[in-house]
């Protein structure tokens, strides 16, 4: 099965109105070429799941500036003033999720879990409208899984089967996003032959990856 | 009381550095808390946690020696120390929430005598998002707030926070340029007094009810 496609072919999977999970943390470890290609295609009404909304000129922040998104589910928007402006003008819906909760909600979707219980957010606005459960005398919030139609991730080294190795701090949300979407597209910084990554060093197994672009 | 801005910061971060114990895993928030790393006493070996996915955060790289794959949680170029380990965001917050992080140091807009903390938004004005702060404050074994005692003449240490909370009842210790306060079941106790500062000055700059113990000592800086 040949997963290697051109960016143009990969974009066939991305349609208006989809929920798209994107790896990266403040634009480090984000698939920049795929992000730019989505802008060039003019995709609209995306619901974005990402750690943050990037910067106006870097990472997924460009989608906010170019109005590709209608809703963002992120932990932080402080580095992209355009997100805050659009939120205040009611042009963009913003759901702020504590970072650890975001990671676990995405992981839950990928792991087949019906949700997770976390103490984070108890006694804050985050608990509003959520179910609280008491386990052994301690209160937890029930946080629900976050599933995506497509995940766009960035791999430092990717083999032609789709096994991924992430360098240093580029790993962040990438392996988690790779488990939670119907279609997973990885942008390879370096594409290598099968066998060149030691199986022990594989951080995302190829079975999660549908499309590889370079 | 201390007036000079730089001296205030120095007193605050030095005192917090003296609080850290050998072998501890510590997360330093963006801004003033990051300066704590510059004052770690000799012989104290701590490991810094960076919530974007590693333990063993090192100092800023020299100009021209940046590695694009290593940044801190504020997206600034960073380095790692020998013996560091990188991981994904789920592991990063497993460490934070699971009780594996000894200390978190972070700034505040407001703190109150019940240990409530507000540091992530001002409704209608500033909504940067909570990032990892809510998890850090709930999960770390010890939560230290590093901040100036007042902002524009207004006290930041209140009977009850008025801004949206980051977490309820999680703060252990507040370090300002006026002293050290600890949140206890009895209330907020002034345990140490800063240099050049009187108890009366601290009380006047604090809205919270401050318990002044008999064994109040000079600030360890």
Image: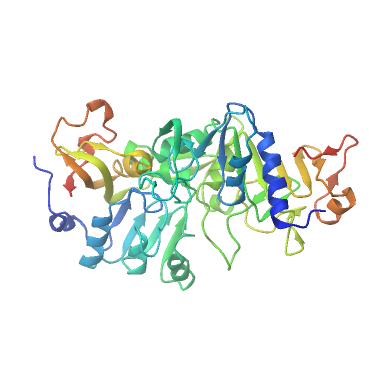
Q: Which residue is depicted at the point 13% across and 53% down?
A: A6
Q: Which residue is depicted at the point 86% across and 56% down?
A: B204
- Horizontal and vertical percent for residue A29? 33, 48
Direction bottom: furthest residue: A89
Q: Which residue is depicted at the point 76% across and 47% down?
A: B113
**Towards the viewer: A63 or A92:** A63
Image: A138 above or below B114: above
Image: A147 above or below B184: below
Classify the position of the C terminus of chain B by image quarter. top right
B67 sits to left or right of A77: left
B121 sits to left or right of A161: right
Direction left: furthest residue: A1
A206 sits to left or right of B73: left
Q: Specify whether residue A59 is in view.
A: yes
Location of residue A161 by image quarter: top left
Q: Which residue is depicted at the point 68% across and 34% down?
A: B19
Image: A50 above or below B190: below
**Towards the viewer: B151 or B78:** B78
Q: How many numbered marks are there?
A: 0
**Towards the viewer: B167 or A53:** A53
- Horizontal and vertical percent for residue A145? 39, 44
Location of residue B122 by image quarter: bottom right
């Amino acid at each position: 099965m040949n997963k290697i496609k051109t960016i143009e072919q990969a974009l066939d999977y991305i349609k208006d109105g989809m929920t798209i999970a994107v790896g990266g943390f403040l634009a480090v470890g984000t698939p920049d070429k795929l992000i730019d290609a989505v802008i060039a295609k003019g995709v609209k009404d995306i619901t974005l799941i990402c750690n943050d909304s990037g910067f106006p000129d870097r990472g997924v922040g460009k989608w906010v500036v170019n109005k590709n998104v209608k809703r963002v589910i992120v932990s932080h928007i402080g580095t992209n003033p355009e997100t805050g402006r659009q939120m205040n003008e009611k042009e963009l819906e913003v759901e702020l999720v504590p970072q650890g909760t975001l990671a676990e909600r995405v992981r839950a979707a990928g792991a087949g879990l019906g949700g997770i219980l976390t103490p984070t957010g108890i006694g804050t606005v985050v608990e509003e409208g959520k179910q609280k459960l008491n386990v052994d005398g301690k209160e937890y919030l029930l946080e629900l899984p976050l599933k995506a139609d497509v995940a766009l991730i960035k791999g430092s080294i990717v083999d032609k089967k789709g096994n991924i190795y992430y360098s240093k701090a580029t790993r962040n949300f990438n392996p988690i996003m790779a488990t939670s979407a119907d279609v997973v597209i990885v942008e390879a910084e370096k594409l290598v032959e099968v066998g060149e990554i030691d199986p022990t060093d594989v951080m995302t197994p190829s079975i999660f990856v549908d499309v590889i672009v370079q | 009381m201390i007036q000079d801005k730089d001296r205030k910061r120095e007193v605050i971060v030095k005192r917090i550095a003296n609080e850290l114990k050998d072998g501890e895993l510590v997360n330093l928030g963006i801004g003033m808390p990051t300066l704590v790393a510059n004052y770690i006493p000799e012989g104290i070996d701590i490991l810094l946690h960076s919530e974007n996915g590693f333990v063993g955060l090192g100092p800023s790289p020299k100009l021209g020696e940046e590695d694009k794959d290593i940044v801190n949680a504020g997206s600034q170029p960073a380095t790692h120390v020998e013996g560091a380990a990188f991981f994904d965001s789920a592991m990063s917050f497993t460490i934070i929430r699971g009780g594996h992080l000894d200390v978190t140091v972070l700034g505040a807009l407001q703190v109150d005598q019940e240990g409530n903390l507000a540091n992530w938004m001002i409704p209608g004005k500033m909504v940067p998002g909570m990032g990892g702060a809510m998890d850090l404050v709930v999960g770390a074994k010890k939560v230290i707030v590093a901040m100036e005692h007042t902002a524009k003449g207004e006290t930041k240490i209140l009977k009850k926070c008025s801004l949206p909370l980051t977490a309820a009842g999680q703060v252990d210790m507040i370090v300002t340029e006026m002293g050290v306060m600890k949140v206890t079941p009895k209330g907020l106790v002034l345990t140490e007094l800063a240099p050049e500062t009187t108890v009366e000055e601290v009380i006047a700059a604090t809205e919270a009810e401050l318990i002044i113990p008999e064994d109040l000592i000079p600030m360890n800086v």
